[in-house]
Amino acid sequence: MVAGAEATNAPALAVTAIDKWFGPVHANRAVSLSVPRGTIHGIVGENGAGKSTLMSIVYGYYQADAGRIEVDGTGVAIKSPQDAIKRGIGMVHQHFKLVDTFTVLENVVLGVEGGPLLGPSLARARSELGRLEQDYSLEVDVDAIVGNLPVGLQQRVEILKALYRGADILILDEPTGVLTPQEVEHLFRILRSLRDQGKTVILITHKLREIMALTDNVSVMRQGSLVADVRTSETSREQLAEMMVGRSVLLRVDKQPAQPGPIFLEVDELRVVDGLGIERVRGVSFNVRAGEIVGIAGVAGNGQSELLETLSGIRSATAGQVRIKGKVVSTAGEDGRQMRRLGLGHVPEDRHRMGLVVAFEACESAILGFHDTHRYNGPVLLKRPEIVADVDRQMHDFDVRPADSHLATANFSGGNQQKIVLAREMDRSPDVLLVGQPTRGVDIGAIEFIHKRLIAMRDAGKAILLVSVELDEIMSLADRILVMFNGAIVGEVAPAAASEQALGLMMAGERVAGSAP
């Protein structure tokens, strides 16, 4: 801390007139904000609003084209993460920066060994970590292999890394995306403890309920600019959502009770073993009826991804049977083409890895998997005019912005990339739709739109299997909720009887009274 900072009551962090361009994209537009010392400060905004860019400038990943950064009232030049760390700024990323095969202690020391001999460094770190764990309720076995720890404990390791390096300002980017409700509550206790002991916490999240529960102040960004800076106690989720989007947003899902029809998808004792010989799906059985949404809740890494990939024809099963509208289908994982021909659509969990080719034009990404159909495939070349006409119509129907089918897929925001995938799969009106993480990395306005589309598809008599780590989403959309843990279905809960606490316990492997086995 800079001498005299307390006397002048300078903010822990202040940025003034920050500008940042990426080619023609004006990511930050003269952004100025101040973060008081010893507070939890939220930053919210739609995808592409500039919040992550701003914090990346503060942490040294990017350099601003114009503007000033002050730490404890003193102007600083931050040209790298090392500069940020020297100024007492730490960052916990959405995707952890840990070495899975190292112990907790080795991960914490990595990069700050402090001498040619590792032994003394490890001894010093062990002593300091003991103090930090006690001070901030960050209990974790320092000798445990990081790859063997649950995700909530891995996150604690990232926080310990930052504190060990002397962080007084801690930035967290979407920190609760893969945590159970119980882990979220523990994280909140940790962050409140950090604040109460004088640390400053900056929280980047799209979850407004968490903003309301945890923060002291919140800054709202829209289209690269700061549009509001308010005390959390003086605002509401609805007001924040409207400031983020520029219009009123429906934060609840408006739907009528489901009218289930015949069974469209049946899964019977499905088992899946991965390339390492680990059984990821263990004897899973369930069904999905026409006119209903069945939600699968679970912490990432508990077999949901392997289940979706198997049902979509991407991955092979080792045992079990799958039927679509009574017809037994191959589970050899040879190709997803047969599944599409049987009336199955698939929105993958990771749009970049499996849903799109970001280097392609949007009109090319929007026909992936359907490019060999007669409508698009000519004797020698693809029928480009027909493709462009179809994709232009889909973009209009699904409100993709900008509505430019020739624009590279990489140049769309995450929410609009997701709409391209949804449009591609839903426009064909499949009887069964598999949807993985439909709103991951998607802003509030796009979430509202996607939810309405899924409900409309349900009401049209389609069967939808929804996998999401967002419990709010599961409880709002699903007509039945299944919970997966360690590759198995551990219970079924009716949405009316579901609570985040009960689902969270089941997601952690606990048996809860009232849930069907």
Image: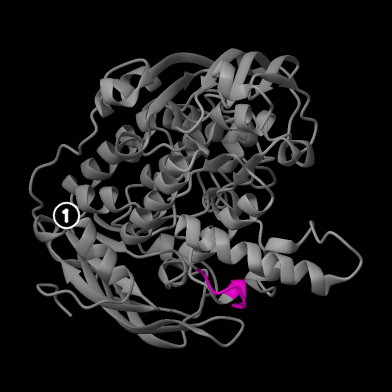
- Who's the residue at 42% across and 14% down the image? 228
Reading the image, the residue beneath label 1 is 291
Q: Amino acid at mark 1?
A: Gly
Q: Position of residue 7 (x, y in %)?
A: 57, 19
Q: Nearer the viewer, residue 315 or 442?
A: 442
**Residue 235 occupies quadrant:** top left
Task: Read off the magenta span.
Answer: 140-147
Quadrant where the image shows the N terminus: top right
Query: Residue at point 58% right, 14% down?
Result: 31
Residue 193 in view of the camera: yes
**Please, is residue 361 above or below residue 66 in the view?**
below
Is residue 235 visible to the viewer in this orientation of the structure? no
Taking the image as shown, residue 98 lies to the left or right of residue 511, namely right
Please provide percent x and percent y for residue 93: 59, 48
Q: Secondary structure at mark 1?
A: loop
Residue ID at (16%, 46%): 459
Q: How many marks?
A: 1
Residue 345 lies in the magenta-colored region: no
Q: Main secondary structure of the magenta part?
A: loop
Q: Is residue 446 above or below residue 22?
A: below
Q: Is residue 279 left or right of residue 492?
A: right
| Label 1 neighbour load within 10 Å: few <14, some 14-19, many 20+ | many
> Which quadrant, please, contains the C terminus?
bottom left
Left or right: 307, with 133 as reference point: left
Image location (x, y in percent) of residue 296: 30, 64
Q: Percent position (x, y) of residue 361? A: 64, 34
